[in-house]
Amino acid sequence: MPEGYLTTHILDTARGCPAEGVKIALYRVSGNSHKKITETVTNSDGRTDSPILGQDAFKTGTYELIFFTGDYLRETGQATEDPLFLDQIPIRFGMADEAAHYHVPLLLSPYGYSTYRGS
């Protein structure tokens, strides 16, 4: 049985704090097909309360996290234009090791973002 799992978190680099209350959706990607696996919201630490993909559901493959950052940026007064520059941020990535912990964080500001494979 696989022991891998997936976690994420969001840091607001413009304000220097975790991004609380951001909706995140996880999709499994196969060719042009996207299958929604789960949806969650970040807590006060900018993290999800549990792994976004736990060991019981983990499978290797291609996935996409969609971070719904628009509402957060509006609520924190960081973005007012319509349409927003960064309303939704998709990050597509692969997980090849069925026993690994994959961590895909989002470093967010109103006009830019970055990500990496964390630990």
Image: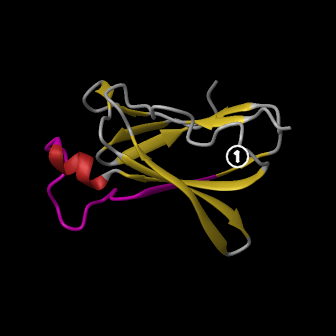
Q: Which residues are magenta?
A: 76-92
Decide: is 64 above or below 58: below
The picture places residue 27, in percent across and down from the top left corner, at: 59, 59
Q: Secondary structure at mark 1?
A: loop
Residue 47 located left or right of residue 76: right
State the residue at coordinates (68%, 64%): 29
The picture places residue 117, in percent across and down from the top left corner, at: 64, 34
> Please, what is the three-letter code of the amino acid marked with disc 1?
Ala
State the residue at coordinates (53%, 53%): 38
Q: Is residue 89 magenta?
A: yes
Q: Which residue is mark 1?
A: 57
State the residue at coordinates (58%, 38%): 104
Residues 28 and 38: in front is 38
In what quadrant of the picture does the C terminus appear? top right
The picture places residue 2, in percent across and down from the top left corner, at: 82, 37
The picture places residue 105, in percent across and down from the top left corner, at: 52, 35
